Image (cartoon, rainbow, N blue to C red):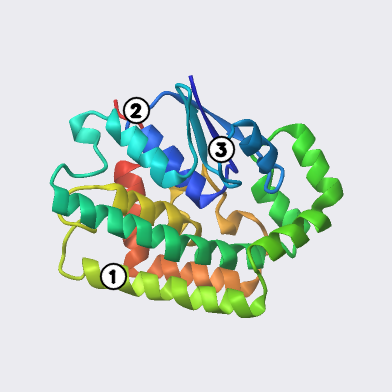
Amino acid sequence: MATLVTIPFSHFCEKARWALDYTGYDYVEEGHMPVLHRFAVWRATSPRTSVPVLVAGGHVFGDSTEILAHADASARPERKLYPDDAARRAEVQSLEDDFDERLGPHIRRVIYFYLLPNQDMARKVMDRGTPSWERATVRLLFPVMRRTMNRFMEIDARTAAQSRDEVLRTFDDVERRLGDGRPFLTGDRFTAADLTFAALAGVAVFPPESEKAYPSIFSLGGEVPQDALDLVRETQARPVGDFVRRIYREHRGRPC
């Protein structure tokens, strides 16, 4: 059986997990803590250091876009994530790439900026679906892990503010695209573009169906900074919030 190596609460891992579930792909998930996930990635012989990684049939798929393409190749026609028409397929792939490169890293930086300063809050998010020895290691080495993550992702107040602006610009672009009344980003059917946007934006909306991927920010208690709560409430109240909730509600799951 195929194995999906993840950091369970990662939005890029949620993108891959959603695609595998949606297309009915048979797999097991192997979750790891941040930083420690690199050992699993190395064992999987991925050329990258990041997750998700799918190991299937002797092949290694080293990022979420490769995983979506692989899942789509064996999907039933009604569960395809990419259109057959070349022009429409190119449009879907262009949007997917844009969200991966623009929304994904920036919203991750913002969330980590709020999450990492508080070890107890961070562990409430990170502990789920990971091995007990990794959780114990992170308890002991959390300050080291936090410094490593901040350095690797260039997280500080200045970059977090810039990333927040970029996230909001992406939300504006999506709302303009949906402004003509279309039900999905590229027209009248659900595609990889909708899945990618909803998965990556889900960490600022927290639809009920995303609870498996990441707990709602409102479940973490009074430790959450007010700026983080304000960002989530603002996003939830926007048209993109409605869109993300609908996409999760109608399309997050395995085929019957």
Q: CA distance from mark 2 to mark 3?
A: 24 Å
At label 3, the amino acid type is Ser
Q: From the image, tell me which residue sits under label 3.
A: 46
Number of other residues with Cα within 10 Å of mark 2, as a class: few under 14, some 14 to 19, many 20 or more? some
The mark nearer the N terminus, 1 or 3, is: 3
Q: CA distance from mark 2 to mark 1?
A: 30 Å
Q: Residue at x 59, y 33 (%)?
A: 45
Whether residue 202 appears in this view of the structure is yes
Number of other residues with Cα within 10 Å of mark 3, as a class: few under 14, some 14 to 19, many 20 or more? many
Q: Residue at x 23, y 68 (%)?
A: 177
Tell me, for residue 175, which label it has, or none: 1
Whether residue 223 appears in this view of the structure is no
**Left or right of 240, for residue 124:** right
Q: Position of residue 87 (x, y in %)?
A: 15, 54
Q: From the image, tell me which residue sits under label 2.
A: 24
In this view, which residue lies farthest toward the right? Answer: 140
Image position of 142 with respect to 174: above or below = above
